[in-house]
Every structure is written in structure tokens, then in C-alpha cells.
Amino acid sequence: MITGIYAALCGVLLLVLSYRVIQRRLAAKVGLGAGGDAELEQRMRVQANFIEYVPLTLILLYLLEQSGAASVLIHTFGAVFVAARAWHAQGLSSSVGRTAGRFYGTLITLLVIAALSVLLLVRSIS
């Protein structure tokens, strides 16, 4: 199961992002919400953005894999997606403004979702 590799990598990245939120919560002594702490709010958004995109993309990747798509295609989409999410997390973590990581990480993420959706739709109705 190829998708399992990319789900595991996403899981590790989520643990890193979650650790950063917990670390800041402890330092800022904030138990719920962001408590007005801009850095905590930024770290929470990085984690939340990750959580917003990863589940559906992994489902699409898994379904495409189960439809019999070529392994190289699944690996390509999986690797590009994980790299895009890491790039986005790095970009948004470094600045709340526009960064190359944030912009291209988002763009590539959306392109992967679009491509997976179209391929899965085509394979499903063929």
C-alpha cells in the first residue's frame, strides 16, 4: 500500500507541527485558543491548515491507488504533496505575510488535489 507511506510522512509532519503548538502554549501559558499570543496563533494556523488539506488528499490518493493506477503515479503525487505541505508549513511558519513557501506550497497542494480528483473521476466513469 503506497498511500500508507505518504500517510505516515504526513503523520510525522503533523506531530512536528503539533509539538510546535504545544511548545508555544506552554511558553505563553495559554490553555485554550491563542490567548492573544500572535506566535501561538501563527503556529496554530500552520497546524490547522495542514489538517484542512491532508485528509481529503490522502483519501483521493488511496482511492486512485485502489483503482489500479500506476505505482509511479501514486508515488509522484504522494511525494509532491508531502513536499508541498512541508514547504507551505515552512513558509507560513516564517512569516504571516506572503512567502514563496506559502504561495507555492498552496499552489502545488491545490494542483495535486485537482489532478487526483480529475484522474479519479475519469477512472471511475470509464
Image (spheres, rainbow, N blue to C red):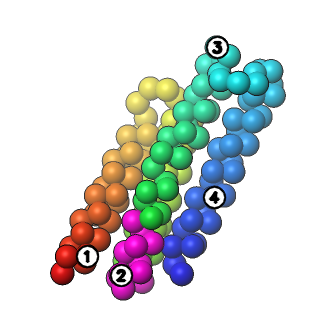
**Location of residue 89 (image quadrant):** top right
Q: Are marks 3 and 4 in contact (CB under 8 Å)?
A: no
Q: Residue at x 19, y 76 (%)?
A: 125
Q: Which residues are magenta?
A: 60-71
The residue that label 3 is drawn on is 36
Q: Nearer the viewer, residue 109 or 102?
A: 109
- Is residue 105 toward the left or the right of residue 3 in the image? left
Residue 116 at x, y percent in the picture: 32, 65
Q: Quadrant of the N terminus?
A: bottom right
Counting residues from the N terminus, which is met first, the one under dot 1 or under dot 3?
3
Q: Can residue 94 be seen from the camera position used here?
A: no
Residue 57, compared with residue 63, is above or below; it is: above
Residue 59, compared with residue 4, is above or below; it is: above
Counting residues from the N terminus, which is met first, the one under dot 3 or under dot 4?
4
The residue that label 1 is drawn on is 124
Real-space Cα distance between discs 4 and 1? 28 Å
Residue 64 at x, y percent in the picture: 37, 75
- Is residue 72 toward the left or the right of residue 12 in the image? left
Magenta stretch encompasses residue 63: yes
Real-space Cα distance between discs 1 and 2? 8 Å
The residue that label 2 is drawn on is 67
Q: Nearer the viewer, residue 34 or 112?
A: 34
Counting residues from the N terminus, which is met first, the one under dot 3 or under dot 2?
3
Q: Are marks 1 and 2 in contact (CB under 8 Å)?
A: yes
The residue that label 4 is drawn on is 11
Counting residues from the N terminus, which is met first, the one under dot 1 or under dot 2?
2
Q: Are marks 2 and 4 in contact (CB under 8 Å)?
A: no
Counting residues from the N terminus, which is met first, the one under dot 2 or under dot 4?
4
Q: Quadrant of the C terminus?
A: bottom left
Amino acid, disc 2: Ser
Q: Are marks 4 and 1 in contact (CB under 8 Å)?
A: no
